[in-house]
Amino acid sequence: MNLRRDVFQAIADPTRRAILLLVASQALTAGAIASNFDTARPTVSKHLQILTECELLEQKQTGREIYYHINAQKMKDVADFIEPFRQMWDDRFNKLEAIMKNYQSKK
Amino acid sequence: MELKTKIHAENGQHDLVITREFDLPLELLFKAYEEPELVEQWMGTKVLKLDNKKHGGYQFETSDAKGNVVFKANGTIHEFVPNQKITRTFEMENAPFDVQLEFLEFEQLTGDTSKLTMHVVYRSVALRDQMLQLPFAQGINMAHNRLQNIVNQLK
């Protein structure tokens, strides 16, 4: 259960989602991944660590380089990628709540 | 941070349930669905038509800053019971998704709190899963657009 929540937290971040998309098309080294982002290298490393801990990414040694692969099975488990959908509705309903509280106090 | 909105979607089913508790009296929650000006505010879209009654319907349209229409949706209202229930269809125009059926139920919890339960039925399991993934795909697109903007600035 705890792991499941962590996975959702992992994919809730837009940079981490972009990393997953990059790696989904081909296995890449940490350096190659980082070169796609304007973010500091240690920040990208941290994202990679989180994604690996959640088992969304796997590390495989090829020669002297470590490549990141997507863990397709895990991605499928998280499936439905329900979290951004929930976030979208939560944002919308938060807005509704704020607008109606304001509406009430104006009356 | 715990989100107040819950989504219940079972694997292999072609429906889902969205629930949310509001710090609002039932009447105010319902009003947010009833008044076109309020719908416009919280949905962030223009309401072209909102005929809240049995056999009624609605039309929404959203434009970008340049005035291009980026989103159009419409639906038919099958049931409209104030402070209790709205049954309606929802269809995105110019999009490859079939119409969906929505059952909205409004409940009072206490004098100041209320609950909305939204049961959405899609034509197929695949379509439901596609709709669930849509915000994820959009998030990726947004991340890509940001990357593209950064790259363009470097040129």
Image (cartoon, coloured by chain):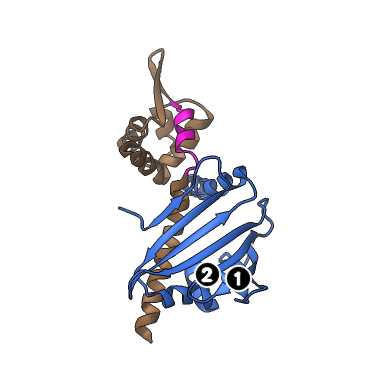
Element on which disc 2 rests: strand
* Residue tagged 2: B85
Question: In blue, which chain?
Answer: B
Question: In brown, which chain?
Answer: A
Q: Where's the N terminus of chain A, which quadrant?
A: top left
Mark 1 near mark 2, Cβ–Cβ under 8 Å? yes
Graded by Cα atoms within 10 Å as few (under 14), some (14 to 19) or many (20 or more), the crowding at tag 2 reads: some
* Residue tagged 1: B79
Is residue B70 visible in the rendered image? The answer is no
Which residues make up the magenta segment? A69-81
Q: Chain of mark 1?
A: B
Q: Three-letter amino acid code at disc 2? A: Lys
Q: Where's the C terminus of chain A, which quadrant?
A: bottom left
Q: Three-letter amino acid code at disc 1? A: Glu
Name the residue at 33% across, 33% down: A45
Closer to us: A87 or B81: B81
Is residue B76 visible in the rendered image? The answer is yes
Q: Is residue B66 left or right of residue A65?
A: right
Q: List the single residue furthest toward the bottom.
A: A107
Q: Earlier in the sequence, mark 1 or mark 2?
A: 1
Is A72 included in the stretch rendered in magenta?
Answer: yes
Closer to us: B52 or B45: B52
